Image: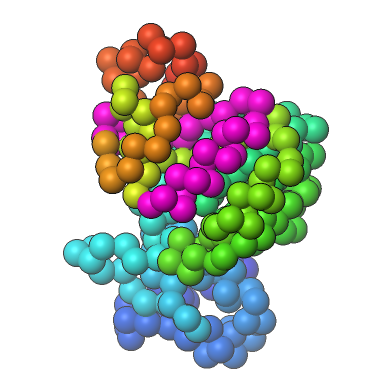
Amino acid sequence: MNFPKRKQKIIEQLNLNGEVDIKQLAAEMNTSEITIRRDLNQLAVDGVLYRTHGGATKVNPHEKPHSFANKSAQNAVVKDAICRRAASQINDGDIIFMDCGSTVFRLCQFIKNKKIKVITNSLPVIYELQDSVASVNIIGGELDKERQAVHGTIAIEHIQKYRATKAFLGIDGISQTGLFANSEQEASITTAFAANSAYTYILCDAGKIGKETYLNFAGLNIINAIITDADNSKAKIFEESGIAVLKADV
C-alpha cells in the first residue's frame, strides 16, 4: 500500500475515532511500525494531525499547537517559500549550522540531495536528514523535550569547536533594536552559531519583523542576511543597517 492510500486510511480512522494507534495501523495495513510512524510524522508536519506517544489525534482547529511537528506546520506555505530561498544559498561542500527553529526545520526537504555537512542541535532535523546525502554532526548536551533540541554549556562548547560557512537560524522577534528570543537557552545557541559561522542568515516570516519578545539577546551586527516574505517597507530598516534582505516568493 502506497503513502496516499495509507494517508486516506489514517484520516478515515481519525475522523471516525478521533485518534489512531501506530501498532494497530501497522497491523491493519500489513506494514511496519516504522513506516506508520514516518507517515504520522509527515502528516503532522502537513498539519493534518497531532502526533502523540504511540499514535496521533485529530487536529482541533480551536486548540493551540502543542508539539514541534504541529508548530512547524503552521504557516507552512510561507515557511517553505523562505526555506526554498535559503536552500538556493547552499552549495555542495558547504558546512552549515541549523538550529531548532520550526522554520529552519522545513529547510531539510530542500537540502537532502546536497553534498553538505549539517551541524545541528535539533532532533527533528537529525531525524529528517538521517537517510539523506547530507552528512550530519549532532551537537551534544542537555535535551529539551518540549523543543526537541539540545541546549546547555556542553552544547555551546561543541559548537565552538567548529567553523561553518553558513548558519541558518530562527528567532522569535527582530527589530531595529536587535534579535529577540523567548528563552536564554535558545539565545545562547543562536549567539554561538552566529559567532562561529562565516555568514549568518535569519529565516523569519513577516509576523516576526518588528516583534520584540522576552529577551533582547543580540544586536543586528551578528547577522548578515534575512530571508523573509515581508514587504519592502518592513525590510527597509534592515537594508539600511547593511543587512542583505532576500525576499521569498510566496
Quarter of the rendering containing residue 236? top left
Query: Considering the image in quadrants, where does the C terminus appear?
Result: top left
Seen from the viewer's position, the closer of residues 78 and 183 is 183
Bounds of the magenta span?
183-211
User: Which residue occupies 51% across, 26% down?
Assistant: 223
Q: Is 207 in front, or is 218?
A: 218
Residue 46 in the image: state x and y as whole percent.
Answer: 44, 57
The answer to whether 218 appears left or right of 213 in the picture is right
Q: Where residue 245 sits in the image (x, y, percent)? A: 45, 18
43 up-or-down from 25: above or below: above
Can the viewer see residue 72 in this picture? yes
Location of the N terminus by quadrant is bottom right
Which residue is found at the position 63% from the left and 74% from the top?
Answer: 35
Q: Is residue 170 above or below residue 23?
A: above
Residue 86 figure quarter: top right
- Residue sitting at x 62%, y 25%: 199
Judge whether residue 103 can be spotted in this image. Answer: no
The residue located at (59%, 85%) in the rendering is 26
